[in-house]
Image (cartoon, grey):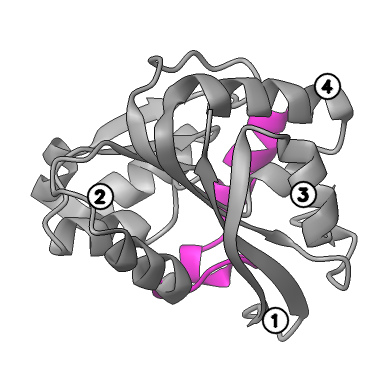
Amino acid sequence: MTKEDHWEQIYSTKLIKQLGWYEPHLQTSLNWIKEFNLSVDAPIIDIGGGASTLVDDLLDEGYQAITVFDISKKALSLTKARIGKKAELVTWLNGDIVSANFPACYYELWHDRAAFHFLTLPEQQQKYRDNLIKALKPSGHLILGLFALEAPPKCSGLLVKRYSIEQLEATLGREFELNQHHKELHITPNGIEQMYLYCHFRKIV
């Protein structure tokens, strides 16, 4: 089964609120984004955000240049249906992050909760990093939420790469400066504990 087929099956057979990473609001991300004082027309991209409620909350805050990227067409369609007419205000991109092509130096914020850790191979992580470096503006913000070392080794039936903050800094490289980070315990709808590492970086070159 391809990655695309795996995620299409996940989103076709489960309700959004049954998914392991579901949260009604990504409060840490929202709090940080407010601290950034971005203009309402600042380009923002949410990687793997197909079923996330972040787009709902960003629209409610008045942001006007939001892009949602996801490997699953089904996930994107579910969120479009959920937000109704507001979907016309959002750019929706379907693809695989390791082969995607983004505009250069465009986004002021790159947000990713629970997508990057599914890239378990160094070459996948490098392609993600290449896309990130290309697409994010100098001094742009990066928010990453991913499995910490204490988290389970799998999510949604797939192996994940778990990180310490030191490992993540080494993976991202000298182009990014860590501003803040903390660990956050997430409880899945099935009662499973998942320890997340939440990080805010700035692109410095």
Query: Badge 4: few (under 14), some or many (20 or more) residues near its Cα, within 10 Å?
Result: few
Query: Badge 3: few (under 14), some or many (20 or more) residues near its Cα, within 10 Å?
Result: some
* Disc 4 residue type (three-letter): Glu
Q: Is residue 131 left or right of residue 173?
A: left
Work out whether residue 85 can be spotted: yes
The residue singled out by tag 2 in the image is: 81
* Disc 1 residue type (three-letter): Asn
* Disc 2 residue type (three-letter): Ala
Q: In this view, does 145 lie to the left or right of 171?
A: left
- Residue extent of the magenta highlight: 3-25
Q: Earlier in the sequence, mark 2 or mark 1?
A: 2
Quadrant of the image occupied by residue 190:
bottom right
Residue at 21% from the left image edge and 40% from the top image edge: 42
The residue singled out by tag 4 in the image is: 123
Please identify the dominant SS of the magenta region. Answer: helix
Q: Earlier in the sequence, mark 2 or mark 3?
A: 2
Query: Badge 2: few (under 14), some or many (20 or more) residues near its Cα, within 10 Å?
Result: few
The residue singled out by tag 1 in the image is: 190
Q: Earlier in the sequence, mark 4 or mark 1?
A: 4
